[in-house]
Image (tube, helix red, strand yellow):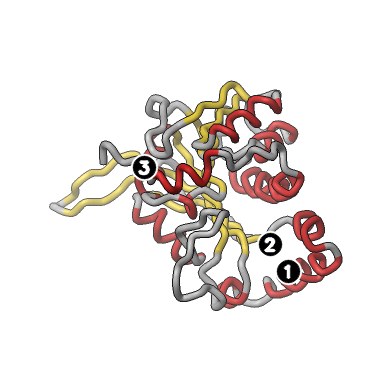
Amino acid sequence: MAGIKVSDHLAENYEQYYEEGDSEWRRLCATQKAGSIVSLCSSLPHKSVLEIGAGEGSILSRLSELNFGDRLHALEISPSGVAVIEGRKIPKLVECKLFEGYDVPYDDARFDLAVLSHVIEHVEYPRRLLYEAARVARFVFVEVPLEDTFHLPGDFVLDPVGHINFYSRKGIRRLLQSCGFQVLGEIVRTPAKGAYVYRWGRKGLMKYYVKEALLKLPLSLATMLSTYHGALVCEKVSQVRTIRGETSSEFMGPPRRREG
């Protein structure tokens, strides 16, 4: 896996991605995203937290406001994102580093929790980055938009948002499990109401409540009809051992699950 790097055209797309500075829309979105982290991870060790792909720092800022974690760290591929994060002076942020997209520049088991919030959908080699997250942290939180719905077009076209992977609820669970992770908890939520209102006004409020109503249906149906945010927290395999010629996995701690 050595030598893997982000493709030039994707790196160029993100280089000046956050030039506009602290975005009100991203701040509003971060309320829901940070809320999912707290909901799923507050009962787990989280004194030291690393956000991989921290954007312009809205989630870290909100986590700091919520007093989640004692020491926050950030990695970001975009120089403009790093500049904005450093300018925010987030109280609990220890450091923010620019990185090349895959190799996490920290020692093994450095953190309690690694956060990949709305990152995996942008990544060409998601398993490589997930392995790195699990190397440096005991627990890994992942959130993605569940865009693999009835409405997803048949053909791919790269847009400025930069999504290149499109997940269903089942698809993201299987990706994590195929990396040797045990899913401890899961939440499916409508994106932040404030972000809908900010972008579309009254129409956005109606869209939000329609999506909320759809969540009363079975999740498998709701997530095929509309895009939601799927968040999961996982624990890495701590030990692999062979018993009677068969390989089995032992995980740290008992399995836990939360549905929401």
Q: What element does badge 1 sit on?
A: helix
Residue 222 is situated, as x and y percent measured from the top left of the image, at: 62, 74
Q: Could you say which is closer to the camera, residue 108 or residue 83?
A: 83
Give the residue type that dot 3 points to: Tyr
Residue 134: mark in rendering: none
Give the residue type that dot 1 points to: Glu
Badge 3 or badge 1: first in the primary sequence: 3
- Asked whether, in this view, residue 197 is left or right of residue 126, the answer is right
Separation of disc 3 and disc 1 at Cα? Answer: 34 Å
- Reading the image, the residue beneath label 2 is 190
Residue 179 is situated, as x and y percent measured from the top left of the image, at: 35, 51
Badge 3 or badge 2: first in the primary sequence: 3
Q: Quadrant of the N terminus?
A: top left
- What is the crowding at mark 2: few (fewer than 14 residues within 10 Å), some, or many (at least 20)? some
Separation of disc 3 and disc 2 at Cα? Answer: 28 Å
Q: What element does badge 2 sit on?
A: loop
- What is the crowding at mark 1: few (fewer than 14 residues within 10 Å), some, or many (at least 20)? some
* Residue located 41% across and 54% down the image: 176
Residue 131: mark in rendering: 3
* Residue located 64% across and 49% down the image: 36
Residue 212: mark in rendering: 1
Q: What element does badge 3 sit on?
A: helix
Give the residue type that dot 2 points to: Thr
In the image, residue 182 sits, relative to residue 56, either above or below, namely: below
Q: Could you say which is closer to the camera, residue 220 or residue 29?
A: 29
Separation of disc 1 and disc 2 at Cα? Answer: 6 Å
**Is there a contact, CB below 8 Å, between mark 1 and mark 2?**
yes
